[in-house]
Image (tube, helix red, strand yellow):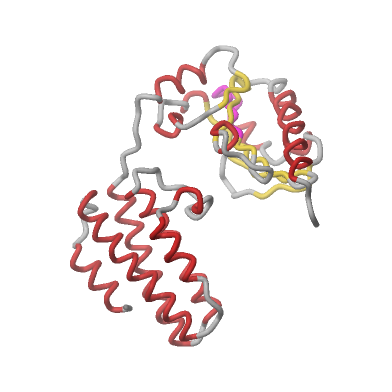
Amino acid sequence: MRFKESELAGARDRLLPAIRSHLIRQQGVVGLFLAGSIPAGTADAYSDIDLKVVVRPGRYLDFVTRRLELPRNWPGFLFNEWVENAAHCVSHFRPFLKVDVYYLNEEALAPTPWLSLPTEILYDPEGIVWEVVERSQRLRFEPDPNEIDRSIGKGLAAAHEAYRRIQRGELAYAQSLLDELRLNMAMADDWLGGRPAQSIALSRIEQRGSELLLAVLRASYVPLDVEEMKGALARLVGAYRAQVAELHGRFAPGRPLENDLEALDIVL
């Protein structure tokens, strides 16, 4: 199906006020704000609505419980996708729209570097959201050495397991392991570039990734062929080796550098 981008953008512009109108009538809602590409001014016709809903503590669990039901009241609803025991829901709407809704407990709303990124306040009658966003402007992202440690371990494991599966001829599974390696390389690129690592690491990587990373990624998407996949793995591991060395030098993740480099050299 083909979409006219102007129609998609127009449909999104109509959907957002309808969602706002419905939510502000719900007892317990004290704030609504947008994050992501729309307030940043980088949205295109296919961009999601990334909506945060701030809720009174006494009503918070009720909203989390009803997170799949609420979007059914918004025009054009098609289906939900969700994770159990989570406080968010992703909903899809006609003609081809997606809305990510996160429910936040007012008591847990506190200054964070994430709120120093562009936001658009849609509803804030008591100034709760504005105050927290203002206080967040002084904060900066500081990579967590433990998170870097975990990511390096994941990246090394993905490289090793990809090598094993390629050797066995399990190429479809090996491709998924190459993806795992790519994800951790994208996270490393964010940290080294002074950016917060994204929860969906490869999302919009073309807009923010370094030229070196993008070149390696482009060359790594190969057919299900043993020799081509060995070559892709070697290219990825070679680039990841340089990233790992730089991560150690800048962030001291608390793991032996020599072990990490040896682990990567094994599969080069």
**Taking 47 as reference, is 228 left or right?**
left
Image: 42 above or below 27: below
Could you tell me residue 127's position as x and y percent?
53, 14
Q: Does the magenta stretch include residue 58?
A: yes
The range drawn in magenta is: 51-60
Residue at image point 57% right, 31% down: 39
Image: 49 above or below 84: above
Look at the image and tell me in which quarter the N terminus lies.
bottom right
Q: Nearer the viewer, residue 137 or 59?
A: 137
**Taking 202 as reference, is 261 left or right?**
left
Could you tell me residue 96's position as x and y percent?
75, 47
Look at the image and tell me in which quarter the C terminus lies.
bottom left
Residue at image point 69% right, 21% down: 24
Q: Which of 39 and 101 is in front in this view?
A: 39
Q: Which of 97 and 5 is in front in this view?
A: 5
Could you tell me residue 82's position as x and y percent?
63, 48
Residue at image point 43% right, 86% down: 167
